[in-house]
Image: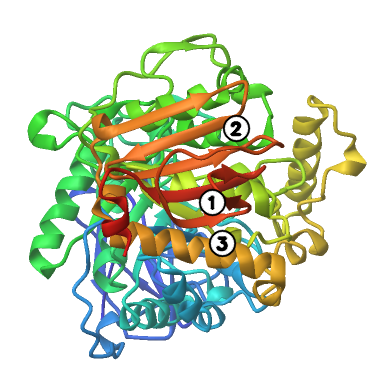
Amino acid sequence: MKYQVWAPIADRVEVEVDGAPHALAREDGGWWRGEAPAGLDYGFRLDGGPALPDPRSARQPYGPDGLSRLVDHAAFRWSDSPWQGRPLPGAVIYELHVGTFTPAGTFAAAEQHLDHLVELGVDFVELLPVCPFPGRHGWGYDGVSLWAVHEPYGGPDGLKHFVDAAHRKGLGVVLDVVHNHLGPSGNHLPRFGPYFTDRHQTPWGAAVNLDAPGSDEVRAYLIGSALAWLRDYRVDGLRLDAVHALADTRALHFLEELATAVDALAAAVNRPLFLVGESDLNDPRTTTPRQAGGLGLTAQWSDDFHHALHTAVTGEAQGYYADFGRAPLAAVARTLTRGWFHDGTWSSFRERHHGRPFPLDYGHRLLGYCQTHDQIGNRALGDRLTPDQLALAAALVLTSPFTPMLFMGEEWGASTPWQYFTDHTDPGLAEAVRQGRRREFAAHGWTPEQVPDPQAPQTVLGSVLDWSEPRQPVHAELLDWYRTLIRLRRAHPELTDPDLTAVRVEFDEEERQLTVHRGRLLVSVNLSDKPHDLPAGRVLAGYGEHAAGRLGPRSCVIALAGPDVSAESR
């Protein structure tokens, strides 16, 4: 059996297989290679130290600090699914956290609810990060073994079973991956080589080394991990966490190099593969094709659209909502017709100008949403929008020129919060996280007792979806509305048209009424507490009160407009 590891700073490397050490030979470029008997568990010993997990380990059965286990990806038996992949434009994404999607918190348990997602009408399931992290519970953004799958979720085969089951039902799978940092516990990479550099600092400390000496191998490590998810697990796309935190001064940016490699793999496997970036730069170059001088990602998140919607339906205007909250309906209109609110404008939250204009022909390159794991979980109590607020926001999300994304449970107005939870096994780190969370929200007027303890079992248990809710009347009504909106999006090409110049928005800030024109269709939303007149048209679907040309308080409708309304609506 051949073993290899990149460890340029070591003077001696051994592979320990089932407790027995075997010396490896140094080769060019800092690599160590050699033969050893095939075994169950293994690790690498550097300069006589303890056995460490393989940085490229595909399985960590004992957690991120334990020994690694070999995985034969070719041994998994995939079903004869007709799935050939599908491109991202025109799709609807559903963001899902495996650990709180069901009480069991496993891939197998999540599979049992795939029919719910099929009936909802979404196209892709986006899984929050699944790499191993200390303990059982966590959001996944503290992962440390970037080629492996969190064992409590079901490990490598559990993820493959989930992807296979989703594909059989016509659902694609997107995986959230983190390249901008590793978790604070269980990260052994610095002992192997220069995976990090003090040349740049990030919110998590020293930056992942993308441009300092040794960065060629670090980039290869990250790109290899990304390709493994797409190839070995047959995932359809990757969501890249906080790409604005990737510090890279090289002429060929890491994201461009990654996008090139993913396109090459897509050609090799003959199915669409894509990358979606989370970026707060409001820079269209992130998704501009490489041939036109961009980085070549397929799409990016659009927090501006979220912030505009959130202020419109809640009235909140603190912190980064301030610019949007001054005239929330104008902010909604601006994002629907220009992509970003801040496209070179002054940002009072940042105290500087922010962003640059978005290319108006490519609305599908922006993901539109009214809730995400971040926007819920980073609130002190992890509280969600109410069913009535969601109904109005969803009407605008699912008829927008963007690529819509939902967060698990929003389709029925889940009453369960989604809070920040951890399961750090290091008591010191656990206490530091607990106190840090309390300090963060103390600045906003919260007392320590009001902020949920991330380490408390009840925090994660209280964040688990309650699957009895979709059968309850108020939740069932909202679920039917979401299904209706997605069906309308499928049935009317105007609603998937990404041309922002074709979107027309009328609004009355004082009366809190907004109408979006999408070709022959209009989306009328009344955010006020009093009824308003409906624009002329034939109602196709609605939520709340709508009759005799009147739209009730906190209600919305989708209608066909134009002289041939009657004929078109039959």
| Amino acid type, label 3 | Glu
- The reply to whether discs 3 and 1 touch (Cβ–Cβ < 8 Å) is no
Q: Earlier in the sequence, mark 3 or mark 1?
A: 1
User: Which is nearer the N-term, disc 2 or disc 3?
Assistant: 2
Q: Secondary structure at mark 3?
A: helix
Q: Residue 312 — which label?
A: 2
Question: In percent of the image, x 58 and y 43: which residue is there?
Answer: 550
Whole-percent x, y for residue 152 in the image: 59, 75
Quadrant for the C terminus, please.
bottom left
Residue under circle 1? 141
The image shows residue 440, relative to residue 570, as above or below, that is above
Please tell me which residue is depicted at 65% across the width and 72% down the height of the picture: 470
Q: CA distance from mark 3 to mark 1?
A: 25 Å
Q: Residues within 10 Å of mark 1 (few under 14, many from 20)?
A: many
Determine whether the residue tagged by mark 1 lies in a helix, strand or loop: loop
Q: In this view of the protein, which residue sits in the foreground, 450 or 329?
A: 329
What amino acid type should be assigned to the residue bearing mark 1?
Tyr
Q: Position of residue 255 (x, y in %)?
A: 26, 39
Q: Amino acid at mark 2?
A: Ala
Query: In the rendered image, which residue does mark 3 sit on?
Result: 411
Callout in the foreground (1, 2): 2
Query: Which numbered disc flags the more N-terminal residue, 1 or 2?
Result: 1
Between 453 and 415, the one lying in front of the other is 415
Name which quarter of the figure residue 471 lies in. bottom right
In this view, 138 is above or below 324:
below
